[in-house]
Image (cartoon, rainbow, N blue to C red):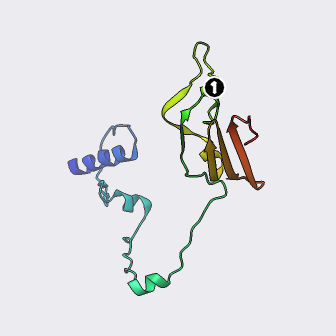
């Protein structure tokens, strides 16, 4: 009966109940002792192990079709970094030209790369940059579109 009592307490602990057994313990037959290495099969009712698949022959693998699934709401995996002269707004970050904090100054030059979130919003096809401006060619939902940032003194954007 001591082994049965230990098994019942062990089963109660596994099932998450915290009530203690009070009173006289009667012997129970056919108690399944749940152990951590086989508990998933007994709890979930699995009767067999997973079957091993046969390896694919190299000649047959070349003939198998390849599929690429792309979701409709897929985000672009292009990471876009900008650095250089930031005084004219050509880096595409408005916080460099007009900072949002009260006592911060505009940045004249960005010495190290800053990540630009534009690559995540649109599918970037091509980009062009010059002194004080940057152009982005993207595929939008409505069609191909061109975005520009920075100076437009010579109508380059």
Query: Is residue 57 shown to the viewer in this render?
Result: no
Residue 151 image position (x, y, % from top left): 69, 34
Q: Determine whether 99 is above or below 11 in the image.
A: above
Residue 78 image position (x, y, % from top left): 55, 50
Which residue, as the protein is rendered here, is positioned at the far right?
A: 142
- Label 1: element kind: helix
Q: Determine whether 102 is above or below 110 in the image.
A: above
Q: Quadrant of residue 25?
A: top left
Q: Determine whether 38 is above or below 47 in the image.
A: above
Q: Determine whether 39 is above or below 69 in the image.
A: above
Q: Residue at x 57, y 16 (%)?
A: 104
**Residue 146 left/right relative to 58:** right
Q: Residue at x 53, y 75 (%)?
A: 66
**Residue 47 left/right relative to 129:** left
Q: Quadrant of residue 56?
A: bottom left
Residue 133 image position (x, y, % from top left): 65, 38
Residue nearest the observer in this picture, 143 or 135: 135
Q: Quadrant of residue 17?
A: top left
Query: Is residue 39 shown to the viewer in this render?
Result: yes
- Find disc 1 in the rendering and name its residue: 97
Residue 157 image position (x, y, % from top left): 73, 42
Number of residues whose C-alpha sits closer than 10 Å to that of mark 1, classed few (under 14), some (14–19) or many (20 or more): some
**Residue 57 left/right relative to 138:** left
Q: Residue at x 61, y 62 (%)?
A: 70
Residue nearest the observer in this picture, 34 or 144: 144
Which residue, as the protein is rendered here, is positioned at the far left?
A: 2
């Amino acid at each position: 009966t001591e082994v049965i009592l230990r098994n019942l307490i062990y089963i109660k602990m596994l099932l998450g109940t915290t009530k203690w057994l009070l009173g006289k313990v009667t012997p129970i037959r056919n108690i399944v002792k749940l152990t951590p290495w086989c508990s998933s099969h007994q709890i979930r009712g699995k009767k067999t192990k997973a079957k091993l698949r046969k390896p694919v022959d190299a000649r047959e693998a070349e003939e198998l079709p390849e599929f690429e699934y792309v979701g409709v709401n897929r985000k672009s995996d292009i990471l876009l970094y900008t650095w250089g002269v930031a005084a004219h707004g050509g880096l595409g970050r408005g916080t460099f030209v007009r900072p949002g904090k009260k006592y911060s100054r505009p940045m004249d030059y960005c010495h190290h790369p800053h990540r630009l979130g534009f690559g995540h919003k649109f599918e970037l096809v091509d980009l062009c940059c010059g002194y004080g401006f940057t152009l982005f060619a993207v595929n939008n939902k409505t069609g191909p579109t061109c975005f520009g940032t920075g100076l437009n003194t010579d109508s380059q954007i």
